[in-house]
Image: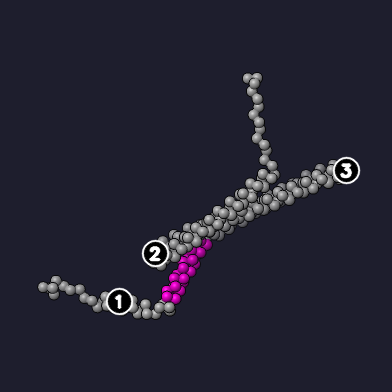
Amino acid sequence: MGNDQPKPQAPKPTIDDAILDMKLASKKFANESRRCEKEKDKLMNQAKVALQKNNEEGAKLFLTSAMNKQREAENLQKMSHKMDYLQGIIKTTTNQTKTMDVLAKISPLMNQQIQNMPLELVYQNMNQFEKAMDEMQVQGNIMTGMMNQNNNIGQDLAIDQMMGQLKQEIHSEVANDLNANPNVLFKELNQQNQQQNVQPISNNQIK
């Protein structure tokens, strides 16, 4: 019992550790966003192939998945930007704190002025700062909710527009093929006419 020694405490994370974690998180979010973009392009190509096969229902499903991937990519990109933004704030705050420490050591007068600073004014300024930050966060959440709601409302319209664009691309490709090889159309028509003119031979004719 008397020989038990207290376990060493883990070192507390520093500001530099927090900044490094944010850099890694920002990079991870950015990579995930690019991965979602690639998956969206793949789904768009699958929707185009399905539409070329006259499978509009399947094309619509692919387009819905592509829309979800696009939204996911945008959200991940926003998170990456937020991590970069927080890094900047922390760095700025840290630099300001270090600057104030240096000035406090150099100038005893500055220390005296800091000590004589009215606490009520400091408290009032801190309350105003916290209130402003809370309001900004609430407004940001409201705007995010409104954007997501608008995205849900306009999803069907966006899918219909994407379907129309795919149809136009397919029609343009067919038109370009006909302009490049006009004989292909006549050859296909002749083959269809020949197949229609061939009559099946009945069993009586064979006898």
Percent coordinates x, y for residue 26 in the rendering: 61, 52
Report the side of 135 relative to 56 (left or right): right
The quarter holding residue 174 reads bottom left
Percent coordinates x, y for residue 148 in the rendering: 56, 56
The quarter holding residue 33 reads bottom right
Give the labeled residue for mark 2: 55
Residue at x 46%, y 71% (from the top left corner): 168
Of the residues under marks 2 and 1, which one precedes in the sequence?
2
Of the residues under marks 2 and 3, which one precedes in the sequence?
2
Of the residues under marks 1 and 3, which one precedes in the sequence?
3
Residue stretch rendered in magenta on the structure = 154-177
Q: Secondary structure at mark 1?
A: helix
* Quadrant holding the C terminus: bottom left
Give the labeled residue for mark 3: 108
Gap between marks 2 and 1, in whole Å?
Answer: 26 Å
Q: Secondary structure at mark 3?
A: helix
Q: What amino acid is at disc 1?
A: Gln
Does the CB distance between marks 1 and 3 fall below 8 Å?
Answer: no
* Quadrant holding the N terminus: top right
Percent coordinates x, y for residue 133 in the rendering: 69, 50
Q: Main secondary structure of the magenta part?
A: helix
